[in-house]
Amino acid sequence: MKDNKKNLKESLIIKAAESVFGDVGFKNAKMEDIAKKAGITKVTLYTYFQSKENLYLALTFKALQLLIEKYYETIDKYKDRSGLDSVIAIFDTFMLFCENNFLYSEALLEYFALVRSTSDGTNEAKLTEAVKDSIYYVKLQDIQNLPFKLTVKEIERGKRDGSIISTLDPMLTTLHGWTMVIGYVKVVSAAGTNATPLFKVSLNDLKSLNLSLARHMFQTKAI
C-alpha cells in the first residue's frame, strides 16, 4: 500500500513537471513551480526527486517506456505482414510518437546525446553528480537499447521472409534508419506545436519521403 501511494505521488509530480517543462523548458523551470503545480510543498518534492535533473530523467524514462510500448503494439499489428512492412511501420510509429509528444521527443534526443557523449555512460567524468545519483538514469540504461533490438528483430524477420535483401547488416541498417528519422524528429521538435512548412515543403511530405527512402534502402543492394 505504501509503495502504491509513493508511485501515485511520483506520477503526479512527473505529470506536473511535464506541464512546467513544456511551458518554459528545462533550463527555465523551477522546482518550486513544479511543486506548486503538483499541489505539494517544495520540501515534499525534494523527498521524491532530489534534483531537477533527476526529475527530467524520470520524465525521459516514462517517454522511453511509452515509445517501447508503441513499438510492441506496432509489431503485434504487423505480425502477419512482411518484416519490411513492420520495420517501415516502426519508423512511422517513432515519427508519429514524436509529433504527438514534443517534450518526450526532446527528452529522448537529449538522453541519447548524453549516451553518445559519455561513451554509453562509461566516461563518468562527463556526468553530473545528479545524473550519477539518479535511479532513473540506471533504469534508462537498462532499456535504452530495446527500441534498436526490436527493430533489428523485425529486419531479421524481413530477411527470412524475403521482403528485405539478405546482404544488409541489421544493426547498421537500424542505426542508419534511426539517424534518418532523427533528422525529421529534430525539425518537428524544434517547431513544436507551431509546426509550419519548411522552405514551403510540407512536413508530411518530408515524412513520406523518409519512409519511401527507408523502404528503398531495405530492398536495394548496395553497390
Image (cartoon, grey):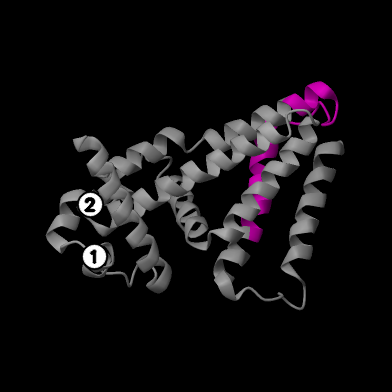
Query: For this view, does 106 lie left or right of residue 137?
Result: right
Position in image of residue 1 (x %, y %): 22, 34
Q: Magenta stretch?
A: 157-184
Farthest residue toward the top? 160
Residue 222 in sight from this viewpoint: no
Mark 2 burial class by Cα count in 10 Å: few <14, some 14-19, many 20+: some
- Residue type marked 2: Phe
The residue that label 2 is drawn on is: 49
Near-viewer residue (159 or 96): 96
Image point (21%, 68%), residue name: 32
Residue 84 screen position, x and y as percent: 79, 35
* Secondary structure under the numbered disc 2 in the rendered image: loop
Residue behind mark 1: 31
Relative to residue 11, is residue 79 depicted above or below? above
Residue 123, labelled with which disc? Answer: none
Q: Is residue 24 above or below residue 154?
A: below
The location of residue 91, given as percent across then percent down, is: 68, 46
Which SS does the magenta portion mostly show?
A: helix
Q: Is residue 71 above or below residue 29?
A: above
Q: Is residue 166 magenta?
A: yes
- Whether the magenta-drawn stretch holds residue 183 is answered as yes
Distance from Cα at disc 2 to Cα at disc 1: 10 Å
